[in-house]
Image: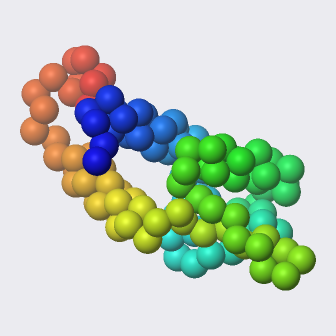
Amino acid sequence: MLTIASEIEVLARFGRALADPIRCRILLALREAPAHPADLAESLGISRTRLSNHLACLRDCGLVVAVPVGRRTRYELADPRLGHALDDLRTAVVAVAADSTCPDAADKNCC
């Protein structure tokens, strides 16, 4: 069972992973299907070196896993629930962004 401190650490790791647009794109791509690094780099339009650095970060955060397949390595989300969490988070963010009921948004540039 997770303690409150460890739950906060897990959420902070998830937040750090989502803080970079490339990592977000990788997670969304892996939500669709597992992929080999070369295929991911090509589909995302980034170098393999750059992709490798981002995959290492996502592995360290515990969000993706590397699965050996013969002589190659395939990446996938560490848990299928992460795909659902990404969908829920994306939907919630879009809903909040569409909500213009915050009276201070224009003045405080907060929303």
Q: Which residue is drawn at 60% across and 69% down?
A: 76
Q: Quadrant of the C terminus?
A: top left
- Where 89 sits versus 84, above or below? above
Query: Considering depth in this image, is 4 or 72 the residue closer to the camera?
Result: 4
- Where 44 sits versus 107, above or below? below
Q: Which residue is drawn at 15% across and 23% down?
A: 104
Residue sticking out furthest to the bottom: 70
Left/right placement of residue 62 relative to residue 88 reads right
Coordinates of residue 61 in the picture (x, y in percent): 56, 44
Identify the colour scheme used. rainbow
Residue sticking out furthest to the right: 71
Coordinates of residue 32 in the picture (x, y in percent): 52, 76
Query: Considering depth in this image, is 7 or 43 the residue closer to the camera?
Result: 7
Query: Considering depth in this image, is 29 or 68 the residue closer to the camera?
Result: 68
Q: Residue at x 41, y 33 (%)?
A: 9
Query: Considering depth in this image, is 8 or 54 the residue closer to the camera?
Result: 8
Residue 43 appears anywhere in the view? no
